[in-house]
Image (tube, rainbow, N blue to C red):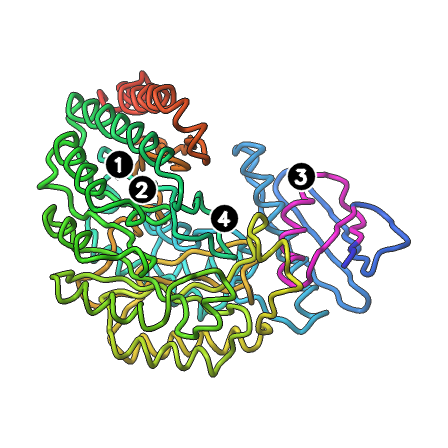
Amino acid sequence: MKISILGINDDRYKRPLTLIADLFFEETELVLGEDASSDLEINFAIQETDSLFFVNGKLFEQSSSLEMELVPSESEKDNFRRKKQAISNVYLTLLQEYTGMIQKWGILTGIRPTKLLHSKLQQGISREKAHQQLREDYLITDEKISLMQQIVDRQLQVVPDLYNLQEEVSIYIGIPFCPTKCAYCTFPAYAINGKQGKVDSFLGGLHYEIESIGAWLKEKGIKITTVYYGGGTPTSITAEEMDMLYERMYNSFPDMKQVREVTVEAGRPDTITPKKLEVLKKWNIDRISINPQSYTQETLKAIGRHHTVEETIEKFHLAREMGMNNINMDLIIGLPNEGVPEFTNTLEETEKLMPESLTVHTLSFKRASEMTQNKQRYKVADRQEIGQMMSMATEWTSSHNYVPYYLYRQKNILGNLENVGYALPDQDSIYNIMIMEEKQTIIGLGCGAASKFIHPVTGKITHFANPKDPKSYNEGFEHYTREKIRILEELFFGAGYQIVNKK
């Protein structure tokens, strides 16, 4: 779909307008100005004063307009945000009328909707006023606002001091190996078979990072809130390697007994063994993930997962028998050749196991994944059926006492929906809340691990990522560790932070 935008010449509007168009059409191309080859032409008329910004848009016979207040005393950046919001609202309204498709998330295309609501409530805005602003400024439907509020309430119940954890950190540890690479995956994940040399070198670098960052945290008296092992599949390495890794963690990190939660993704059932579960129990780790994704064998084969449905069930029972008391399971809506019947079966199988938490993902066509690069090979359900399956998940979780506690969205997500984490009472993942709401620094260690440094006073976010491939990581882990410590020094002990806190 090629769309011409008339009346707007500022290139800064091109990306947000393209993202909104992508909610309605596949492979959108947007042009600022006339283009005879365009499929659609949208004409904007804009009037602006020091205090008002008025925009009118026309698409064929449809017309929409909006007036937005500007604040002369505020920065150009803040007022541009208001102008972008006004144009986006008009644009979305026109496309909804033209296509008959209602976007329940309105103009929001970002990953973290609940962060927006948290911010408003933290500013002292009443719940009713915040909801009104979400409705009017972003065109979010009441259904999604209600979901956002339910999640925010649950998060503040689980982490009452969520807004006051900026002087602590969480740790993400990335293990970049898996038995095989899934077709939809873009995470750092390398098939582990035949790679023992790379695994040994990687683990040496990871031990160095853990020891160095741990020493700095101890020296500075900074506490750790949560630790999360992701990847890849952290249980791809051997039981002996896991044991040594957790020992290094306990010896290096400060006050491990005070850490609120340690999670290890054991997502691939084919990596779970009694010896590995014994190691987890030895180090008091009982929060793990065992991820079926689907309970249809043909689907697992199509997406490159080499375990069987029976193996998922067997490993779940094994983990339970060996004392794993907090098991998460991931399900994916919209996998190839799956519709309502297959998802009904997945929910029925989940009911037999009743994990403590459940994350329901909607398939996203990530640019670098094998599935995206070969879309013609993977037939997925249409928007209506995807929505029906999400409604089934919502009803099923509610009827089984699961409550939504975190949410995130992705680009190119089927049906413009969302991924939602549900948990039984007192079984929520604190790390998932911390990573989504961005209230504290998360230090990434290991291959492909991304650090998110959040200034304790201003909230400004700085990103820093380790290399994604083991070879580059093995060659440079000392440098990347030094860089993280340098950023942490500036973040927690720089002049701006000290001045503010001395007042």
Q: Which mark is residue 166?
A: 1
Quarter of the picture containing the C terminus is top left
> Are the residues flagged by discs 4 and 2 in contact, CB closer than 8 Å?
no
Q: Is residue 247 magenta?
A: no
Q: Which residue is mark 3?
A: 12
Q: Marks 4 and 2, how far apart in space?
A: 26 Å
Give the residue at x 81% y 50%.
6
Q: Earlier in the sequence, mark 1 or mark 4?
A: 1
Image coords of residue 79 (percent x, y): 58, 39
The residue furthest top is: 495
Neighbor class of circle 1 (other Cα within 10 Å; few <14, some 14-19, many 20+) is: some
Q: Which mark is residue 439?
A: 2
> Are the residues flagged by discs 2 and 1 in contact, CB closer than 8 Å?
yes
Give the residue at x 44% y 66%.
332
- Where is 357 relative to 221, above or below? below
Mark 2 belongs to which amino acid?
Lys
Q: Marks 2 and 1, how far apart in space?
A: 6 Å
> Are the residues flagged by discs 3 and 1 in contact, CB closer than 8 Å?
no
Q: Which residue is mark 4?
A: 186
Number of numbered discs: 4
Among the 4 quarters of the image, the one containing residue 220: top left
Q: Marks 3 and 1, how far apart in space?
A: 32 Å
Image coords of residue 344 (percent x, y): 41, 81
Mark 3 belongs to which amino acid?
Arg
Image coords of residue 189 (percent x, y): 43, 45
Image coords of residue 56 (percent x, y): 73, 56
Neighbor class of circle 2 (other Cα within 10 Å; few <14, some 14-19, many 20+) is: many
Image: magenta residue range = 4-31
Mark 4 belongs to which amino acid?
Thr
